[in-house]
Image (cartoon, rainbow, N blue to C red):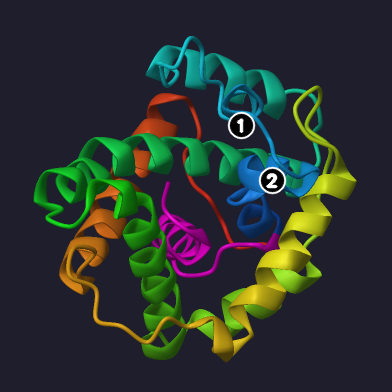
Amino acid sequence: MPYPMVHFAIALELCSRTPSSSFLIGSIAPDAVHVRGNVTRNEKGNTHFVCEDRFPSIEVLKERCQYYLNLNDEASWKDYVLGYFAHIYADIRWTETVYSNFEREYRGEKDKIRKIYDIESNQVEFNLIRREEWAEDILNKLYVGSAYSIEPLLTQIEVSQYRDIKLQWLRNKDNEPQITPIYLKEDMVKSFVTKTSHELTDLYKEWGIESLEAKKF
């Protein structure tokens, strides 16, 4: 549910301000399913471990995360996997908090709720790019990151293509809506990023992952 720059902001706090390129590309990988075109709700749900329209439980996330971590001993793979599961957890928490609040507060026409949400989310993206000193470095790191296939969910090619599409979009200033968000306000987004990164830190520790150190890949 949050757009890429919010996931990157979480990655920054979660990884002591220096997330690896592998973690960054992993943190948007679950949404790479969109490169297939008009994907179904079920297809997108699969990459997020949604079952019968329900988000995965914490226990399911733990089991799946540990399963993928154990498939490869490379540090870059492990960062990629941790980024992938950070994305899913952030989606869950965003839906339960920020998006739930958006739906309660929304006062526009019912058939335009998704359009307004998308426009405000896009503005949040560009606000973060413009206001945060880390934005350019993060986007450069994302550019050099290597994707992995995460079977049977997504291929390396799909994730790489999605990364390239997102980078191109974010670097095009013409995509900025140039509005002032009514619902997705700056303080709300910042609070979400901080709270979610702290929750993920605690969660990963519970799963036996003590720290996410910066690595040069």
User: To which residue does mark 1 refer?
Assistant: 44
Name the quadrant containing residue 69: top right
Q: Position of residue 153 (x, y in %)?
A: 75, 27
Name the quadrant containing residue 191: bottom left
Residue 102 or 188: which is nearer the viewer? 102
User: To which residue does mark 2 refer?
Assistant: 34
Give the SS element for disc 2. helix
Residue at screen point 40% across, 16% down: 57
Residue at screen point 86% across, 44% down: 156
Q: Is residue 4 above or below residue 33?
A: below
**Badge 2 density bin: few <14, some 14–19, many ≥20, Cα 10 Å:** some
Alpha carbon separation for disc pair 2 and 1: 8 Å
Task: Identify the image quadrant of the C terminus.
Answer: bottom right
Magenta residue span: 1-21
Q: Could you tell which of marks 2 and 1 lies nearer the N-terminus?
A: 2
Q: Is residue 191 above or below residue 73?
A: below
Q: Where is residue 38 in the image (x, y as percent from the top left)?
A: 70, 40
Q: Which amino acid does label 2 sit on?
A: His
Q: Does 18 appear in magenta?
A: yes
Disc 2 vs disc 1: Cβ atoms closer than 8 Å? Answer: yes
